[in-house]
Image: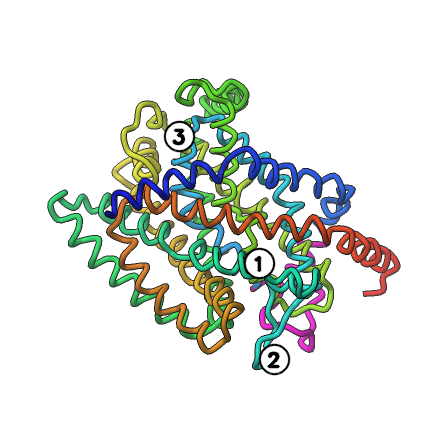
Amino acid sequence: MFLNIQDLVAQFSSWVWGIPLLILLIGGGLYLFIYSGLVPFRYIGHAIAILRGKYDKADSPGDLSHYEALSSAIAATVGMGNISGVAIAIATGGPGAIFWMWVSAFVGMATKFFTCSLSVMYRGKDEDGNVKGGPMYVITEGLGKKWKPLAIFFSTAGLIGTLPAFQANQLTQTLVDVFQVHETNHFTAKLLLGISTAIIVAMVIFGGIKRIGSVAGKLVPVMVVVYLLTVLTILFLRLEQVPAIFSLIFEDAFSGKSVLGGALGVLIITGVKRAAFSNEAGLGTAPMMHGTAKTKEPIREGLVAMLGPAIDTLLVCSLTALAILASGVWKGFKGNGISMTLAAFDAVLPHNIGSVILTICVLIFAFSTLFTYSFYGFSCLSFLTNTKIGKSYNYIYIITIVIASIIKLDFVINLIDSAYALMAIPTVLSTLILAPKVKREATKYFQNLKMNEF
């Protein structure tokens, strides 16, 4: 029976990630990119100033500072998708898939600007009066109550899309690979690791959003810097190959030679899927976190959120891709996901140093994501029911960590991909409809900024 479910999920994932969704995500993002007049991109320096706390005010509504909101959102996105997801993109779509990940990231920055500005413009409140954000509130508060079925659709899909299945699966796989656990003991080892992971995560997530934001704010800078230095070392050791790697990415992006049958469409979809998995632009998760930011200025939070895809995909994903391609292990590699990345690091760095460093990075990446994703599921269930029932999502979340640790990677990827696709539909549609309101607000904000009225 489980095999039948696996096949059905795989078929649905393949169907839902077709041309219509590709047009919605990339076409919608490209429209927002052009419609913005590229104005937000001219204020990246201002976005960094906001991030540094220059405009923070203690009396602003919300729970998290701009920095904590971005750190928490990045902690959710800079995770296993950046290490394992990139390897999957190369294994299934070839080097050219990386180019389409870059394209998705650029349009994703515009999408994030609009979706996260809207998440502050149209915040909701729970029954206790706490500020809440996300596409479900944007839809009901911005489009009106008659659109509530679309908000329910998003929240229902979000209950599955925000499960910690991929992170838990690849975290346990990493440890099993690194410690070379014998195949006959894989199930027991993964189960014990899954239980241990669940206990650690429970200690953080039951502390609520403020504890999550505090922990994420400390973990994110450390994990990005360590990973950056490690990959730069790999690229330095293979420096002569770097120009050829970039040539390979650009050539393969438009030929699809590395994809079975040379299907360019498959290559593009692979790149877009993995970029969505990585930076979540257009999926609607980040607006839930950014919607809790302490600010009265929606555009300010949109600018901060815009930095997410740049850090996540253009920086971290690119580093992973270059390391894998520089190592050469991707050619004919039989494994997938984290196993390929581990092999790439070990192929270049001596004495298994690569495995040790990557394992540390994976632990930080995976746990930071596991800590923050629980808030998204809680937000979705709270919207569908109430805050009291919403808190029970954490129990489902913890149980999922254990189950996901022992099931197959393919099933996990197809399940989460399917949910992400369904979440993207209401998120992007509502954003496109409400985009003019963001543009009006942005025009007013940037005018005030030029007049030094902040």
Q: Is residue 52 visible?
A: no
Mark 1 vs mark 3, foreground winner is 3
Segment tinted magenta in the rendering: 45-68
What whole-number distance in Å separates the C-alpha atoms at marks 2 and 3?
47 Å
Residue 128 occupies quadrant: bottom right
Numbered circle sitting on residue 70: 1
User: On the image, numbered disc 3 is attached to which residue?
Assistant: 92
Q: Are dots 2 and 3 in contact, CB under 8 Å?
A: no
What whole-number distance in Å separates the C-alpha atoms at marks 1 and 2?
23 Å
Give whichever of 421, 401 is nearer the camera.
421
Residue 31 percent location from the top left of the image: 71, 39
Give whichever of 20, 331 is nearer the camera.
20
Residue 246 percent location from the top left of the image: 52, 24
Q: Residue at x 40, y 34 (%)?
A: 234
What whole-number distance in Å separates the C-alpha atoms at marks 1 and 3?
31 Å
Total label count? Answer: 3
From the viewer's perspective, is residue 331 above or below residue 179? above
Label 1 sits on a secondary structure element that is helix
